[in-house]
Amino acid sequence: MPRTLPVKADRFVGNLFIMLVFLAIFVVYYSVVVCVLMPRFMHSNISKILLGIYHFVCVMLGWCLWQTIMGDPGQVPTFWGFHFGDHESKRKRYCLMCNVFKPERCHHCSTCNRCVLNMDHHCPWVNNCIGFWNRKQFVLLLIYVLLSSYLSFPILTYDLYYRLPMEYEKFNRETRSYTGFLSLAIILFGWVITGAASYLMTNFLRFHIELIFSNKTTIEFLEKKGEQFESPFALSPRENWEQVFGCNKLLWFFPVSWASGHPIGDGVYWRMNPNIAANNNSQQNASQASNRQNSENRRLIGQNDSERNDSSRSENSAKNKNDIKANKENINHQPPDSGRSEVKNPPEDSDKHMETVVNRKDEKNTLIVHSQDKNRLLKNTLIKK
Ligand SMILES: [Zn+2]
Ligand SMILES: [Zn+2]
């Protein structure tokens, strides 16, 4: 039986972010409309036109914001996947928390504490998941925020250019009052917000539009980050766009999900691109085969190395033992005629030697005897006869 989990504390904390968003919108609106455009309304036609455009953008922004916050991102249909004969033939994924089978591209959001169809990401600024049913609203929200910022930033910059020296002069020469500074502070605050939003939203919106045209979600992009990856659900760019925005061009600019503004599909079953799916499968198989081959090679190399090390270690130890034994015999007995070598310049104080180490130095039967006597090193050479 599907289970509805309780709302987590993170979701309540997320409401603070929504309040911050509302505060930022209010500051920008107040600075542009009340402080800049309204005082010029009566004697400037440009101000009237700007006010009209600005209010249209603000209404659209508010509508998109409301729909994104309140809209359902997409719920798994009750009992989906429990019945035999479902279209999905491959192994199904199961969410142990929600007690539901997860359709393709469905993920469990840990903040919302529920499974979301075609989950893109959880957006803290709207305190909601972005999924199949509100992705269009979210992207439209980004578009209208960007439009609003592109309108507000030049208006506020123009106003500040004339206002700043005027306010400074007024403060110095006349009343020395701070009344003009309150509106100046609000305008400055709005100017900073719109400047930051213009820069950040441009990149963010571009990223999301690229994702839509390639039929990917943010989660899928992050999962395959750094890899050459084509979504198996990617059709033509137009079909990918219509999958999110619907097939009616007139409704592309409005945050509606009804009628022909409806995203194509149901978020549960997905059309796949057979070419990309086959290509991905062959790449995946090749990658798995390559990984298997590499691990086998590593295993064989490791085995050979250990065998070679064992044999060389045993050979070396035997050889060293023989060499040390032969050299010790040569040194101790020093037969004048029978030996193949003799010691030249024997040390005068050989009785004080603490330790003697014999090393085989090269293939010319030259042996060097290192003697250590109170930090002194002596070399003796055995010369081949
Ligand atoms: Zn879940
Ligand atoms: Zn969420």
Image (spheres, rainbow, N blue to C red):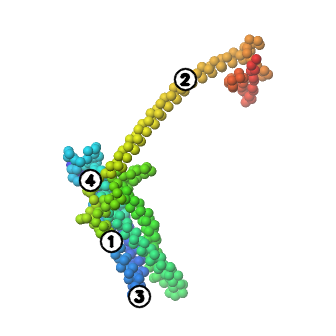
Q: Which residue is mark 1?
A: 60
Q: Amino acid at mark 4?
A: Val
Q: Would you say residue 154 is visible in this rendering? A: yes
Residue 204 versus residue 33: which sits nearer the camera?
204
Q: Residue at x 75, y 23 (%)?
A: 381
Q: Amino acid at mark 3?
A: His
Q: Amino acid at mark 2?
A: Ser
Q: Residue at x 32, y 49 (%)?
A: 274
Upstream in sequence: badge 2 or badge 1 = 1
- Helix, strand or loop status at disc 4: loop
Upstream in sequence: badge 3 or badge 2 = 3
Upstream in sequence: badge 4 or badge 2 = 4
What is the x, y in percent for residue 232? 34, 51
Marks 1 and 3, Cα distance to the nearest angstrom?
27 Å
The vertical placement of 70 against 296, above or below, is below
- Helix, strand or loop status at disc 2: helix
Q: Amino acid at mark 1?
A: Met
Q: From the image, which quarter does the C terminus lie in? A: top right
Upstream in sequence: badge 1 or badge 3 = 3
Q: Which residue is mark 2?
A: 311
Q: Which residue is mark 4?
A: 268
In the rendering, which numbered label is found on residue 43? 3
Residue 4 versus residue 273: which sits nearer the camera?
273
Marks 4 and 2, Cα distance to the nearest angstrom?
62 Å
